[in-house]
Image (cartoon, helix red, strand yellow):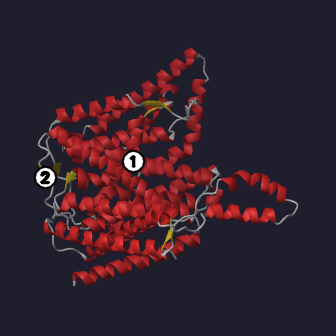
Amino acid sequence: MALLPHLACVAAASGALAAYRFLLIWMGSISEYTDYTAAQLGVAVAYGLAIAAWFGVEVGMFLSPRLGYGGVPSSEDAGLKGIKVASESGGEDASVLTTENESSRDSISPPEPVIFGIRSSGLAALRAAAEFSAIMGYVYLCDRTTLFAKGPKTVSPTMFWGLCAAVLTVGLCTLRLAGKKGEVVTAPLQRDQTEEWKGWMQLQFIFYHYFAEGEIYNAIRLYIAAYVWMTGFGNFSYYYIRKDFTLPRFMQMMWRLNFFVAFVCVTMNNEYMLYYIAAMHTFFTWGVFFTCWIGHQYNDNNAVCLLKIAAATGVTVLLYDVPGVFHAVFKPTAGLLGFHDPLHPEFTDSLHEWFFRSGLDHFVWIFGMLCAYSFPWYDRQLQAIEDMPSGKRALAKAAVIGSALAVGGWYVHTYFLRPKREYNKVHPYTSWIPIAVFLVLRNATASLRARYMHLFTWCGKVTLETYILQFHIWMKSTGINGSPKFLMVWLPSFWLNMAVVSAVYFVLSYRVFKITVVLRDVAVPKDNRGIFVNSVIMAVATAAFYAVGVALKG
């Protein structure tokens, strides 16, 4: 073992821990809360160890080759050396092996430094863990300390709609053709298009919170319904086409939906249901999975597939529309899904928020599955229109667009313009109508299907992160389990402040998205045994850090 790089690693890690300790003391001195939970103390220790481990290993690996220490061959180079040995030993395939790997042997990379069993190729996960720890510290610093000022929201429809128009203008400037270079793709509902859809809805959603623009409440409800529709559509499409019901794929999805929100909940001492979008997507993803998995060997049978969707509808009606069933089913989960809203102490039922939020969209995920099931038919109809002579094609498109607009106008007049509380009553049963209208209009022509706005597509990839972080680093909440009722104020100028805070907000949202993927690939391997082993390790680590938190709390 190379002694000096390892000693340097220990020294650097010790220095990082000392610096981290002083940072925690300083943050505690300006914190608005001093009664930390055991979980908060335990996760603070975990963050510190992650940062120290990364810094120590980084220093050790930096010094290792400079101090003249080698390392071990990379896994790829080890394989090449094995091939070389085989070719030198002779045999009828020796000349073939030698010829095929001549260039590979000439380009063997230098040995990898190894510090306490960690190769340089495995440093990415440590870097991700350390960066994530730093981001979580920043989240706490923004919303739980007095370092950054908070100010009232500016309620201005003119500013809100002006900003939306400006963002749309910029979005139009990023118009791109779908598909790879030189290839024009005109299929409906391709990935870039659905990400674009998520992106512009998310931007208006967060602007709605930033400007407290309550007048568009009904539209926001439709946007959330559209997100849930995509959960049904996307997951059903995957399971129906790929027939992949493996544990690794499912666990990777659960990691994507819940990794970040879990750490935010612990760090900020908030309940899971404050970030209800994550809970809803998780629950409805389970719904799609079980619908597709039960009797999955018969999914190619149309009658069976439709029967399963009908059964899922029946279970949903029983769960949400038969009094008493919902609470009986979810009562055991109240510790996870219960919510105690400090702004609404009149709600004494802890499951009220979960019932209200999930109930608003309890049917639209099923409509998403139906759309996914009907997608091949829909695609064929669009292609049939494109294959018509030009005159008939124009008439057919005009008829489709006109019919969609007529249905949309009827919906707006009949349901959408109702007051908030009245609208909530009909939303679960009617939200599929405007979604269907949008799908028809967005995909009405080949030109529309072949183009997307890249700005919104990019935003659509980080909707989960922007949804969660808006509470804490873009705005400021009212405290534990609190909503973002205040603005983060760094600069006196409203627009300049918004621009600077927004830049940090979107950059960190993107970084959390990338970090989630890096850590997912480490924590959720592609084999069941690896998942079991890692699950045990994470469970033991969680218990250990919680025990440390309990000890620190005294």
Residue occupying the point 37% across, 47% down: 225
Foreground residue among 453 and 354: 453
Q: Residues within 10 Å of mark 1 (few under 14, many from 20)?
A: many
Foreground residue among 410 and 44: 44
Q: Amino acid at mark 1?
A: Tyr
Say which element carries label 2. strand
* Relative to 514, residue 125 above or below: below
Snapshot quadrant of residue 173: top left
Query: Which mark is on residue 150?
Result: 2
Residue occupying the point 40% across, 56% down: 281
Task: Please count the marks in the image.
Answer: 2
Foreground residue among 54 and 505: 54
Q: Amino acid at mark 2?
A: Lys
Give coordinates of residue 32: x percent, y percent. 14, 65
Is residue 338 among what the camera can see? no
Give coordinates of residue 189: x percent, y percent. 50, 38
Report the residue marked by disc 1.
Answer: 227
Question: In the drawing, does residue 267 fall left or right of residue 243?
Answer: left
